[in-house]
Amino acid sequence: MKTLLIRLILDFASFALVVLCLAYWWLGNLSHELFGTALFTLVIVHNVFNRRWYAKVSTSPKDGPKLLNIATIACLAAAMTIMLVSSALISRDLFPFLSLDGAFAVREVHMFAAYWLLMILAMHLGTRWFVVINVFRGVFFIERPNVFRSVALRLLTFAAAAWGVHSTIEMGFGSKLMLTHTLDMWDFNESALGFFLNYGSIVCLYAAITHYSLALMRSRKTAAVSRSS
């Protein structure tokens, strides 16, 4: 349980760092690079904690949910690699000796990869949702299921996901994922908290979609097995 808790802390810290990195025009370049470096450090630590998974993935049996999980992790690795290479090529404060002059195209790639990274991280969280729930139960010593608590948590999740739909539109998140230029800029003078809440709800939306899609796949598999037996 302790190891799982550490992994979850690393995961949620990574989410926080990604969103902080997206607030570039509020924090400035130096803070952006510091948060980005911390993010890559957390990714390395996270992979060290999960090194046994890589040893088992090639030999373990695979079904739809497991294949989706593997695909998500592969896309996450690709996005992080693009982020790492592009960030080194456009660094101005921490690694200026690696940067390229006038690397506008690299900046564009870096920016687009960042939004996809947030999307893939949200999906990764969705594939681990049962683990998150079990760890929270252990932390708060919740042993018995409670219908009212379950209903309340699901309603809260649906409310946050519904706000995530609104935030996806307000933040132009779909356009950013489609590599479409947008002139929409968040006014941090008006509400810095709103920026983080919007992106938090977007993460909740895509995590919930992934989680409930996997739950549907598992229920269909169980129903198919019961019919065939």
Image (spheres, rainbow, N blue to C red):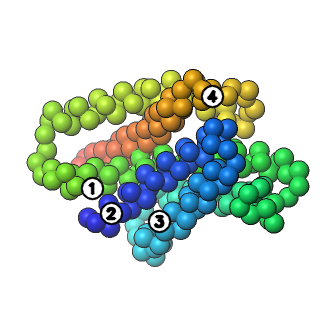
Report the quarter where the N terminus lies.
Answer: bottom left
The residue lying at 50 percent from left, 23 percent from top is 166
The residue lying at 47 percent from left, 65 percent from top is 46
Q: Check residue 46 in the rendering and tell me which mark sits there, or answer none.
A: 3
Q: Which residue is mark 1?
A: 135
Tell me the CA gap for discs 4 and 3.
Answer: 31 Å
Q: Secondary structure at mark 3?
A: helix
Would you place residue 15 above or below residue 55 in this image?
above
Image marks 3 and 2: residues in contact by CB distance under 8 Å: no
Q: Quarter-wise, where is residue 78 in the image? A: bottom right
Image marks 4 and 2: residues in contact by CB distance under 8 Å: no
Relative to residue 193, is residue 31 drawn left or right?
A: right
Which residue type carries mark 1? Answer: Val
Which residue type carries mark 2? Answer: Leu
How far from the left and from the top, in percent, is residue 34?
A: 62, 56
Q: Check residue 186 in the rendering and tell me which mark sits there, or answer none.
A: 4
* 4 vs 3, front mark: 4
Q: Which residue is mark 2?
A: 4
Q: Earlier in the sequence, mark 4 or mark 1?
A: 1
Which residue type carries mark 4? Answer: Trp
Q: Earlier in the sequence, mark 4 or mark 3?
A: 3
Which residue type carries mark 3? Answer: His
